[in-house]
Every structure is written in C-alpha cells, then in structure tokens.
Amino acid sequence: MACLDTSVLLDLMGRGGKAAIARSSALVERLASEGEPLTTTCFNVGELLVGVYRSSDPAAERDKLRVALDGLRVLEFAPECVELFGSIQAGLLAMGRPAGDMDVLIASVAIRNAEWLVTGNAKHLRGIAGLDLATYPGMTLHGA
C-alpha cells in the first residue's frame, strides 16, 4: 500500500502549479490503476490543515484539500505507533541524525500499517529502520 506524504498532497492541491498537479495526478492514477490502495496519515492531514487555516481563503483551500483526500484512507495514530515513534526517534538521536517529530510520527504510522511512504522530501526519513520510501516524483523505492 502507498501512503502519500504531505509533499505529494500539496502538489495535488496545486501548490506547485499546473506541472505539479499533472505530475501528482499521474502518480495517483498510475498507483490506482495498478490496484495500489492509497492512504495518508492523520499527521499529513494535520500539516495540510495548518496551511488551510493560514490561507487568505480557507474555504477554497479546504475544498482543494477535500479533493486531494478523495479516495484516500486516513491512517490513525494507533497505540503501537507510540512505541515505534519513541524507538525510532531515540535511535536517530543516538546516531546524531535527529529528525523532526512530525516526520517520525508519519514514519511510525506508515511502518505500523506496512505502507511504503511516497514523499518528495526523503532526506530526513532515509535510514529509518522498517520504513520503505518511494521518492517522488521519480518514484525510486528505497527499502528499509
């Protein structure tokens, strides 16, 4: 299953212009045509809602968000994710590679649900044990 990160959803919402909309739409269509169930996490939705509420036109941005999320299942932060989050973040800190809490929360949900995370910003997520990453737009898969 493919879990779409915030960067992909932002492109679907048009934040990167027409080219980004076309690129992200093609990705979603390709994954759907391959029978790939599409998801995102509650944290990705939260990040997007920050932009909605900061926008000069929240109603229009909320509509774009609704369209971007159409057909996606939103994965919740289950109790098992708490343990994963703590373990991942502690490991990264021990290696001197701290990552933002939001990135690690998203990773923990993806790992717990056996999803590969499709992201345009993989640098903070590489090396997280158990996380399969697909870098977007090139869709290069990086196994955990």
Image (cartoon, rainbow, N blue to C red):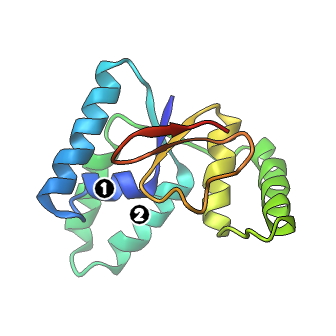
When the figure is inspected, residue 66 is found, relative to residue 144, above or below; the finding is below
The answer to whether the residues at label 1 and label 2 have Cβ atoms under 8 Å apart is: yes
Q: Classify residue 52 by image quadrant.
A: bottom left
Residue 4: percent from left, percent from top: 44, 45
In this view, the residue in front, 125 or 115, is 125
The vertical placement of 134 against 49, above or below, is above
Is label 1 in a helix, a strand or a loop? Answer: helix
Q: Position of residue 71 (x, y in %)?
A: 34, 34
Amino acid carrying mark 2 in the image: Leu
* In the displayed structure image, the side of residue 32 where residue 111 appears, left or right: right
Please report the residue visible at 65 percent of the width from the left and 70 percent of the height from the top.
Answer: 100
Residue flagged by tag 1: what amino acid is it? Leu
Q: Residue at x 35, y 44 (%)?
A: 138
Q: Quadrant of residue 34?
A: top left
Query: Neighbour class for label 1 at 10 Å: few (<14), some, many (≥20)?
Result: many
Horizontal arrangement in the rendering, residue 91 relative to residue 31 (left or right): right
- Of all residues shown, which one is farthest toward the left? 18
Residue 118, which numbered label?
none
| Residue plotted at (28% across, 78% down) | 55
Q: Which residue is mark 1?
A: 65
Mark 2: few/some/many CA within 10 Å (<14, 14-19, 20+): some
Disc nearer the start of the sequence (1/2): 2
Relative to 48, say whether 78 is above or below: above
**Image quarter hosting the C terminus:** top right
Q: Which residue is mark 2?
A: 48
Q: Position of residue 77 (x, y in %)?
A: 67, 48
Residue at 37% x, 72% y is 51
106 to the left or right of 37: right
The span from disc 1 to disc 2 (Cα, nearest Å) is: 8 Å
Residue 22 in percent (x, y) is at 16, 47
Residue situated in front as seen by the camera: 144 or 82: 144
